[in-house]
Image: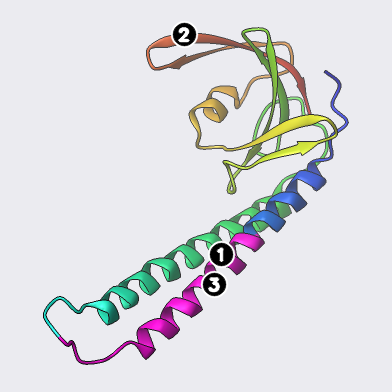
Amino acid sequence: MSLAISKQKIYEMLVEEISQTIARLTKGYLATCDAAIKAQGRMESRYDTIKEEQSKLADVIGMQVYEQRERLRLLQYFWSITTVTTGTVIGPGSLVVVEAENQEKVYFLIESGGGCIFELEGHEVNCISIQAPLARSLIGHTQGEIVEMKIGGRKRLLTVKSLQ
């Protein structure tokens, strides 16, 4: 599989996805805060806990907004210090094609924003955090090497087909 995928494009797609998540969460946070403020202050019975529940929900959503903003900040910082030139050793910022069990997969190793999957140039690109077990197994290897990885007590062999 030849890679004609732009790391810059993947980065931009990640930033867009995280930004949209922040916008959705912020909208939900503001609506929940508004509902908590407008909820009746005095309980009509001991079972009437709407104001308290709305406030707690707003706190949880507010924390999610904070976490997503941190995720975006870390991704932007990571990108600013990562070289986007072709590397010879797998590390943060690498775009790697791996073959396992006769299937090729494309992985983009990043500091923050793992878990996103994008369709780009006819390839499915899996963005994985450098803390993920797969990424930790790949880091430090080079093109052509066979990487041994244990998953759930089962040994799996991965071949590094190409690297950017």
Q: On screen, 57 above or below 163?
A: below
Which of the two residues, 64 or 140, is positioned nearer the viewer here?
64
From the viewer's side, name the closer residue of 3 and 21.
21
The segment highlighted magenta reads 19-44
Point out the image quarter for the N terminus: top right
Q: Mark 3 or mark 2, which is nearer to you?
A: 3
Label 1 is placed on what type of residue? Arg
Q: Secondary structure at mark 2?
A: strand
Q: Residues within 10 Å of mark 3 (few under 14, many from 20)?
A: some
Residue 155: mark: 2
- The amino acid sitting under disc 3 is Thr
Q: Residue 110 falls in which quadrant of the image?
A: top right
Q: Residue furthest left?
A: 46
**Mark 3 and 2 residues: CB-CB less than 8 Å, in contact?**
no
Q: Residue 145: where, in percent of width, then height?
A: 67, 11
Q: Secondary structure at mark 3?
A: helix
Find residue 109 and report its horizontal and vertical position in percent. Answer: 64, 36
The location of residue 122, given as percent across then percent down, is: 83, 30
Q: Give the residue pinned by disc 3.
A: 26
Q: CA distance from mark 2 to mark 1?
A: 37 Å
Q: Is residue 38 magenta?
A: yes
Circle 1 residues within 10 Å: few <14, some 14–19, many ≥20? some
Q: Is residue 65 magenta?
A: no
Image location (x, y in percent) of residue 28:
50, 71
Q: CA distance from mark 3 to mark 1?
A: 11 Å
Residue that carries the numbered disc 1 in the rendered image: 69
User: Which residue appears at 28% of the width and 73% of the height?
Assistant: 53
